[in-house]
C-alpha cells in the first residue's frame, strides 16, 4: 500500500548492480527493529514493548534484484537526559548522516504523530539526504486517518515518496524494498549475497539476553543494565558454551535480577538459551553472572556496546 510514490526504475531491470546504505530513523517504538527483522526475513534486532530498547546501530543486509540494500537500524531519537541517552541519539544521527538514503518511520497509530515528528523532520531536512516517509502500523489505523497524516507530514517536507506499511504483518514492505533498491547508486556489492549482518555473533548473543531482561524486569531497571559476552567456547560435541556478564548499577538491582533463590536469573537464562539454540541450530550452554558496576560512566562499556562515550 503506497501513496505519492513517483515512478522509479526497476532495480532488477538490467545487469547494473546497485549498493548503498539506508538508515531507518524515527522516534522510540516507531517499529524500526521490527521492520529490520521483516526486511531481512530473520530476527536480528531485539524487540520489546518498552521504548529505547535499541542502543546502537545494527546492520541488516537485503538483496533485492540487482541491488544490495544495507539497512541501518538506529536507536530511537528522543530528548536525551543522561550520558547513555546522548550517546544513543548521537549514534542515530551519525547513522542517518552517513547513509545514501533515509527512511523516516512514523508510528501512524500514535496520537499526535504529526507533532511528535516535527523536530525529526526539520533535522532530517538539514542533513540533505534523500528521505522516504514510511507510515507504520497501518493495520491499526483507518485509511482516512492515514491519508490525512501523510498529507500533514508532507506539507513541510520534501519526501521522495510516502509508503504505508505494517512491519508486523509485512503489508507494503515489498514496495518499500523495491523503491529503495531502485534509488540506490550503481556500485559493487559490499557483502557476500548470503550475509544478513556484519554483527559478531557474540554481540548478537548479548542482545538476546538483554531482550529477556527487558521482557522480564519491570519499570526502569532494564535501562540500568548492559550485557556482555565474555566467553564463547566451542565444544567437542558441537555445542557451544557461552559466558555472559550482566552489569547492573547497584546492589539492589543485582538482587532484583537474581530474584528469590535465583529464580529470576534462571528464567532469564532459560529464555535466552532457547532463542540462542534456535538461532544457532545447536545446543547452547549459557552461564550468566551479575556484577555491580557504574557502567554508564565507564568508557570501556560504551566501546563494548559500540557507542561513543562522549557522543
Image: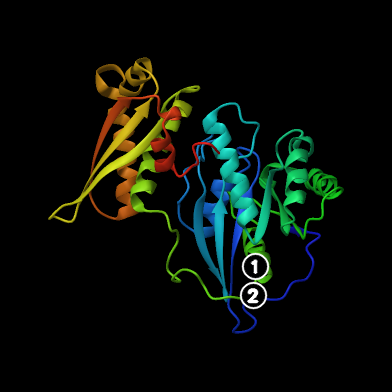
Q: Which of 303 and 54 is in front in this view?
A: 303
To which residue does mark 1 refer? 178
The answer to whether 130 appears left or right of 42 in the picture is right
Q: Where does the N terminus fall, quadrant-wise?
A: bottom right
The image quadrant of residue 130 is bottom right
Is 197 rendered above or below residue 12? above
Q: Nearer the viewer, residue 171 or 192?
A: 192
Whole-angstrom CA distance, mark 1 to mark 2, is 7 Å
To which residue does mark 2 refer? 11
The answer to whether 67 appears left or right of 4 in the picture is left
The answer to whether 47 appears left or right of 67 in the picture is left
Q: Is mark 1 on a helix, strand or loop?
A: helix
Structural crowding at the residue carrying mark 2, measured as other residues with C-alpha within 10 Å and reported as few (<14), some (14–19) or many (≥20): many
Q: What element carries label 2?
A: loop
Residue 103 image offset from top left, x and y in percent: 67, 54
The answer to whether residue 303 of the structure is visible from this angle is: yes
Residue 42 image offset from top left, x and y in percent: 46, 56
Q: Where does the C terminus fall, quadrant-wise?
A: top right
Residue 158 image offset from top left, x and y in percent: 82, 55
The answer to whether residue 50 of the structure is visible from this angle is: no
Task: Give the residue displayed 60% in from the left and 82% down from the top.
Answer: 16
Residues at discs 1 and 2 in contact (Cβ within 8 Å): yes
Structural crowding at the residue carrying mark 1, measured as other residues with C-alpha within 10 Å and reported as few (<14), some (14–19) or many (≥20): some
Task: Give the residue displayed 79% in from the left and 35% down from the top.
Answer: 115
Q: Which of 68 and 291 is in front in this view?
A: 291
Task: Give the residue displayed 37% in from the left and 36% down from the top.
Answer: 227
Residue reaching furthest bottom? Answer: 15
The image quadrant of residue 9 is bottom right
> Going from the N terminus, do you reach mark 1 or mark 2 first?
2
Amino acid at each position: 500500500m503506497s501513496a505519492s510514490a513517483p515512478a522509479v526504475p526497476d532495480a532488477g531491470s538490467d545487469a547494473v548492480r546497485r549498493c548503498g546504505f539506508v538508515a531507518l530513523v524515527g522516534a522510540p517504538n516507531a517499529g524500526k527493529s521490527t521492520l529490520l527483522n521483516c526486511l531481512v526475513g530473520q530476527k536480528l534486532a531485539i524487540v520489546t514493548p518498552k521504548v529505547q530498547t535499541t542502543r546502537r546501530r545494527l546492520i541488516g543486509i537485503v538483496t533485492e534484484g540487482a541491488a544490495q540494500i544495507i539497512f541501518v537500524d538506529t536507536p530511537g531519537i528522543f530528548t536525551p537526559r543522561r550520558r547513555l541517552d546522548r550517546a544513543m541519539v548521537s549514534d542515530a544521527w551519525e547513522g542517518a548522516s552517513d547513509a545514501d538514503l533515509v527512511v523516516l518511520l512514523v508510528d501512524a497509530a500514535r496520537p499526535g504523530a504529526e507533532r511528535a515528528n516535527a523536530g525529526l523532520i526539520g533535522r532530517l531536512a538539514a542533513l540533505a539526504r534523500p528521505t522516504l516517509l514510511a507510515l507504520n502500523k497501518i493495520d491499526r489505523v483507518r485509511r482516512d486517518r492515514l491519508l490525512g497524516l501523510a498529507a500533514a507530514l508532507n506539507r513541510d517536507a520534501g519526501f521522495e515518496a510516502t509508503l504505508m506499511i505494517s512491519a508486523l504483518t509485512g503489508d507494503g514492505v515489498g514496495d518499500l524494498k523495491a523503491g529503495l533498491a531502485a534509488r540506490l547508486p550503481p556500485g559493487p556489492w559490499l557483502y557476500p549475497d548470503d550475509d544478513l549482518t556484519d554483527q559478531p555473533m557474540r554481540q548478537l548473543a548479548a542482545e538476546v539476553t538483554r531482550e529477556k531482561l527487558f521482557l522480564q524486569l519491570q519499570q526502569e531497571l532494564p535501562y540500568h543494565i548492559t550485557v556482555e559476552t565474555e566467553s564463547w567456547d566451542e565444544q567437542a560435541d558441537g555445542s557451544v558454551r557461552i559466558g555472559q556478564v550482566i552489569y547492573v548499577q547497584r546492589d539492589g538491582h543485582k538482587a532484583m535480577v537474581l530474584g528469590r533463590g535465583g529464580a529470576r536469573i534462571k528464567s532469564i537464562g532459560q529464555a535466552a538459551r532457547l532463542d540462542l539454540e534456535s538461532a544457532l541450530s545447536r545446543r547452547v550452554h549459557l552461564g550468566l553472572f551479575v556484577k555491580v558496576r557504574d557502567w554508564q560512566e565507564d568508557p570501556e562499556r560504551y566501546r563494548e556496546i559500540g557507542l561513543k562515550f562522549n557522543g
